[in-house]
Image: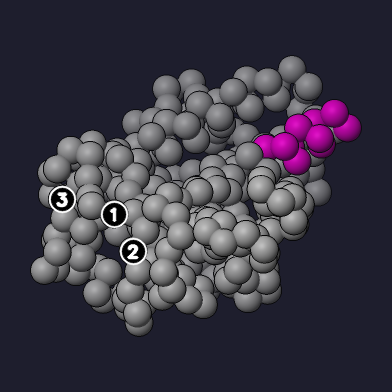
């Protein structure tokens, strides 16, 4: 708090011991945005891993994301590599294992990156990559986990199923929507995660999801879709419930029929809705 312009002056900071969460909250609360110089940063994540730590916030005024990297040892680079996906992503893990030094071509060592069993869903994870032979090769990395990552994975799975079964495709398209609604809510706090785990809230009903987002984030989901899109989503969620929980029949025991041609507008409606919701949450600095 005594150095409110710290986040504007440096992105990589040496400090020992690493700050605790309360100190970071105070720093972010007292700091202006490095881009627009207005006050109103929201802290969205702070994580310590070994001898490094990272914070992520967003400006409520200009929506600029703000990152900072903290290290107990002397940093060798003033830059941060931000990887916009989960550190558990298999493709990313493979790329990390294949990293080589641009100077001597030796394999790089990844420091402080945890095994996937050692951490739960979180917004960011700090790490470093270093060549064992070349001095000054240490690079700072932040994995920035976003709900969009999980949505894209779920949507890719839906696209695989669509080729085999229209009814199965509908189930997985709705699952992709539910995945984004759940992850965007869960990423806000450990309390939200607790509510999901204890099944106090769920996103299998669009109206229930609307109520949750109104209360917790002051976002009305209905405003993010046209009446036609909203009806399409509600119908799909209702059909998905029947397909999963009632052996493919609706409440009147009529067989639920899904045509391949039904899935293209449904997929488009879901993608449009999720994009609008991500935009709305970013505008309020929730993502």
Residue 89 placement (x, y as % from top left):
68, 53
60 vs 201: above or below: above
Q: Is residue 215 visible?
A: no
Q: Are marks 2 and 3 in contact (CB under 8 Å)?
A: no
Q: Are marks 2 and 1 in contact (CB under 8 Å)?
A: yes
Residue 207 placement (x, y as % from top left):
44, 45
- For the residues labelled 2 and 1, the Cα–Cα distance comes to 7 Å
Horizontal relation, residue 106 to residue 135: left or right: right
**Helix, strand or loop at mark 3:** loop
Q: Tag 2: Cα neighbours inside 10 Å, few (<14), some, or many (≥20)?
A: many
Which of marks 3 and 2 precedes in the sequence? 2
Residue at the spot x=63%, y=27% of the render?
267
Horizontal relation, residue 211 to residue 4: left or right: right
Horizontal relation, residue 95 to residue 28: left or right: right
Front-most of residues 258 and 47: 47
- For the residues labelled 3 and 1, the Cα–Cα distance comes to 13 Å
**The N terminus lies in quadrant:** bottom left
Residue at the spot x=44%, y=55% of the render?
77
Residue 161 belongs to the span the image colors magenta: yes
- For the residues labelled 2 and 3, the Cα–Cα distance comes to 17 Å
Residue 94 belongs to the span the image colors magenta: no
For discs 3 and 1, the disc positioned in front in the rendered view: 1
Q: Give the overall secondary structure of the magenta segment.
A: helix
């Amino acid at each position: 708090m005594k150095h409110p312009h710290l986040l504007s002056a440096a992105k990589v900071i040496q400090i020992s011991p690493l700050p605790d969460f309360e100190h970071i909250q105070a720093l972010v609360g007292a700091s202006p945005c490095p881009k627009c110089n207005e006050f109103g940063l929201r802290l969205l994540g702070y994580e310590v891993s070994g001898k490094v730590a990272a914070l992520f916030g967003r400006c409520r005024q200009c929506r600029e994301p703000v990152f900072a990297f903290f290290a107990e040892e002397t940093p060798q680079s003033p830059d941060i590599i931000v990887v916009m996906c989960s550190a558990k992503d298999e493709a990313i893990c493979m790329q990390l294992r294949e990293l080589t030094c641009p100077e001597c071509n030796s394999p790089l060592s990844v420091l402080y990156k945890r095994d996937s069993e050692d951490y739960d869903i979180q917004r960011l994870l700090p790490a470093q990559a270093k060549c064992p032979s070349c001095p000054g090769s240490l690079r700072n990395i932040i994995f920035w986990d976003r709900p969009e990552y999980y949505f894209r994975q779920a949507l890719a799975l839906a696209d695989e199923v669509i080729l085999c079964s229209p009814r199965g495709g509908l189930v997985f398209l709705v699952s992709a929507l539910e995945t984004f609604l759940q992850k965007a809510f869960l990423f806000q706090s450990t309390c939200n995660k607790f509510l999901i785990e204890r099944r106090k809230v769920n996103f299998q009903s669009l109206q229930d999801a609307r109520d949750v987002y109104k209360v917790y984030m002051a976002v009305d989901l209905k405003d993010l879709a046209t009446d036609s899109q909203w009806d399409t989503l509600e119908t799909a969620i209702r059909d998905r419930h029947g397909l999963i929980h009632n052996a493919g029949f609706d409440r009147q025991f009529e067989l639920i029929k899904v045509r391949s041609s039904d899935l293209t507008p449904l997929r488009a409606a879901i993608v449009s809705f999720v994009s609008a919701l991500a935009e709305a949450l970013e505008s309020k600095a929730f993502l």
